[in-house]
Amino acid sequence: MSNPNDTTNATGRKPLPEAQSAGIAPEGAPREAPQQSATARSVARPFPAKAPIQNVSELARASVRPLPSSPASETRSAPQPIPVKPVPASVPAKPVPARTPAMPPAGPAQTPPIRPTVATSYARRRHWFLLLTFLLLVVLPGAFWGWYLWTRAQDQYVSTVGFSVHKEELSPAVDLLGGLAPLTGAAGASDTDVLYEYIRSQDMVERIDAELDLRSRFSRDWPQDFIFAFDPKGHVEDLTDYWQWQVKVLYDTSSNLITLNVHAFSPEDAQRIAAAAFQASSDKINALSAIARDDATRLAKTELEAARDAVTQSRQAMTQFRMRTMIVDPEADLTSQMGVLTGLQTQLAEALVAHDVLTETAKPDDHRVIKSQQRIDALRNLIETERGKFGQQGKGPDGESYSQLVAEYEKLMVDREFAEGTYRTARVAYETALAEARRKSRYLAAHIEPKVAQSSVVPNRPWLLVVGLGLLLSVWSILALIYYSIRDRV
């Protein structure tokens, strides 16, 4: 008969902890023990868990282990254990991994397993390849770049000139159309923008090259300094590109100030090139001002010339009329003719009065009456003749009537007066446009005069060396990343 407190099963092995946690009691234990074990498990775990599936051999070994009995169960008679058929030794039992409990059981702390140490690493072929490419792409080019900067690159000097475009534009005291100017919206490019593009253009380069021979001044240190000096065999386009590299144009759009930093291989060359660039810019501004003045006065000048031609033609027509009619002023001649007619009419009136008085005292056949009547008839004939000159039947100096002469003269007078009035208006408009154009004239004012440099500040060798090394290192890093990405995918 087996002892209830003995923990050895029939096979001579101790039961596994999983059998105890599963609540499998050996034969002879009281029935209350499984309920007490389940209560203990419910206290140990926050929620019930399923018992792990165990092997038959383990269940057999765990069934013979007695559970701790309570005092009440000791008073009862212990039942006999149920014999269990042992598992043959030839069939090995498959171990089932134990379920990790939710709460760690009370007991001594378990030491974590020690991982194996990493094996010693050695340099491989790809590492030597990266080192070789680093030497070829970064170290050697960087060393050559530093050697070139400190041994071959020549010192350059900088001359600075600053200027701005000024406009002498004064608004008149009374400007009726001045309020409409912002509404037109016809504003074009400013003179400063045009000047900025002109300084960087090929026209500026060709002009200064013709004056100072830029090729010889920029290629003085060629081929020793073949990076910073100009190749004298280059074309004008290459010289323009080199000019934009040597002449830095700084344009402040807020204040419309332009600053030129001219680089050259001698202080005198830098100062001369800066002065020549300023003079060329001033000439360009003057040319733009002249063009604007011509544009402003072109229409007024055209109208003035047309009015002058009209006046000339009208006066020539009047001269031809006077030469043809032999009358300087038909109005004055007509006035004299009217005076003659008035005098004749006065004499006729006096003769009629005298004839009436004479006929009252003398006989009709008296020679005085006859003579008086003859005088009256002569005056009447003269009056009719003078009146005929003003009608269609009358004849002027060339067989024309005075009415036709006066009509032609009045037409010529109207044409001449209209032409003279148009000419006076065009003359005033032209003078006004010319004064307005002069009032809006532009000129270039320098606020920084070009000076001769005392020391060289270009090239900045440390900065250029750092920039070169940074670019080389960036290129090498990108190539290394590309190599490793391709290697990982292959």
Image (spheres, rainbow, N blue to C red):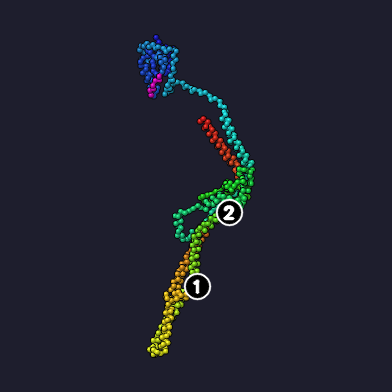
- Residue that mark 2 sits on: 279
- Picture quarter containing residue 371? bottom left
Identify the mark at residue 176; answer none if there is no mark. Answer: none
For badge 1, the amino acid type reads Met
Secondary structure at badge 2 equals helix
- Residue 389, image x, y percentages: 44, 76
Tell me if residue 481 comes above or below residue 222 in the rendering: above
Residue 138 within the segment the image draws in magenta: no
Q: Which of 110 and 335 lies nearest the eye of the viewer?
A: 335
Residue 272 visible here = no
- Residue that mark 1 sits on: 323
Which residue lies most toward the top here? 1
- Residue 374, image x, y percentages: 42, 85
- Residue 422, image x, y percentages: 47, 65
Tell me if residue 46 comes above or below residue 296 in the rendering: above
Q: Is residue 289 left or right of residue 71?
A: right
Residue 125 visible here = yes
Q: Viewer-nearest of labels 1 and 2?
A: 1
Mark 2 Cα shell of 10 Å, populated few (<14), some (14-19), many (≥20): some
Cα gap from disc 1 to disc 2, whole angstroms: 61 Å
Q: Which of 395 and 300 lies nearest the eye of the viewer?
A: 395
Secondary structure at badge 1 equals helix
- Image quadrant holding the N terminus, namely top left
For badge 2, the amino acid type reads Gln
- Picture quarter containing residue 359? bottom left
- Residue 242, image x, y percentages: 58, 46
Q: Which of 293 and 398 lies nearest the eye of the viewer?
A: 398
* Of pointers 1 and 2, the one earlier in the residue sequence: 2
Which residues lie in the magenta part?
47-53
